[in-house]
Amino acid sequence: MVAIPITPTLRSLVVGSPEYFKGRSKPIVPLDLVQHRCIQMRMANGRLYRWEFERRGEAHVIDVPGNLTLDATDLILAAALSGAGLAYIGEYSLAAHMAARHLIPVLEEWCPAYPGLSLYFSQRRHMPAKLRAFIDLIREQAV
């Protein structure tokens, strides 16, 4: 089995807009989230995503409070930008918004990294030409 990395190591971050934080304290530890409005994410299987945190071996998985539940990252991002609450989103979607200071990250030291995406395939002598072309394309584009 061969693996080709497609993306670098990733992590999700908790973010809120400056408008959201007006008159509110920023969470310092994950359990502080129970005092905030959080934008919940419904997964494809119907369950609500539980926010995951880890620091120096201490892990928390939290059912965050919130009255807004969405099922698409772009909608969650738009809601966070509008000040609707805190969002837990992959950092690759946040870079421009954080650079422009439209979103403020919190709990960064609690947000663990996870391996990026990889393409796994069996290395066989007679690989179909379409699969070989796709693998070559991924290798050219890999970060």
Image: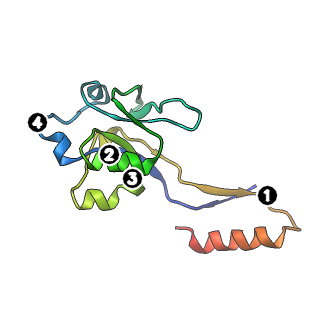
**Image quadrant where one finds the N terminus:** bottom right
Please name the residue that numbered disc 2 is placed on. Answer: 79
| Quarter of image, res 88 | top left
Q: Are marks 4 and 2 in contact (CB under 8 Å)?
A: no
Mark 4 or 2: the one toward you: 2
Q: CA distance from mark 1 to mark 4?
A: 55 Å
Q: How many marks?
A: 4
Q: Position of residue 43 (x, y in %)?
A: 53, 37
Q: Kindly identify the amino acid type of the residue bearing the numbered disc 1.
A: Ser
Identify which residue is drawn at 31% across, 41% down. Answer: 109
Please name the residue that numbered disc 1 is placed on. Answer: 122
Which label number is shown at residue 62? Answer: none
Which label number is shown at residue 91? Answer: 3
Q: Are marks 3 and 4 in contact (CB under 8 Å)?
A: no
Mark 3 or 4: the one toward you: 4
Q: Nearer the viewer, residue 128 or 29?
A: 128
Mark 3 or 2: the one toward you: 2
How did the renderer colour the structure?
rainbow
Q: Kindly identify the amino acid type of the residue bearing the numbered disc 2.
A: Ala
Tell me if residue 66 comes above or below residue 86 in the rendering: above
Left or right: 67 in relation to 10: left
Q: Kindly identify the amino acid type of the residue bearing the numbered disc 3.
A: Glu
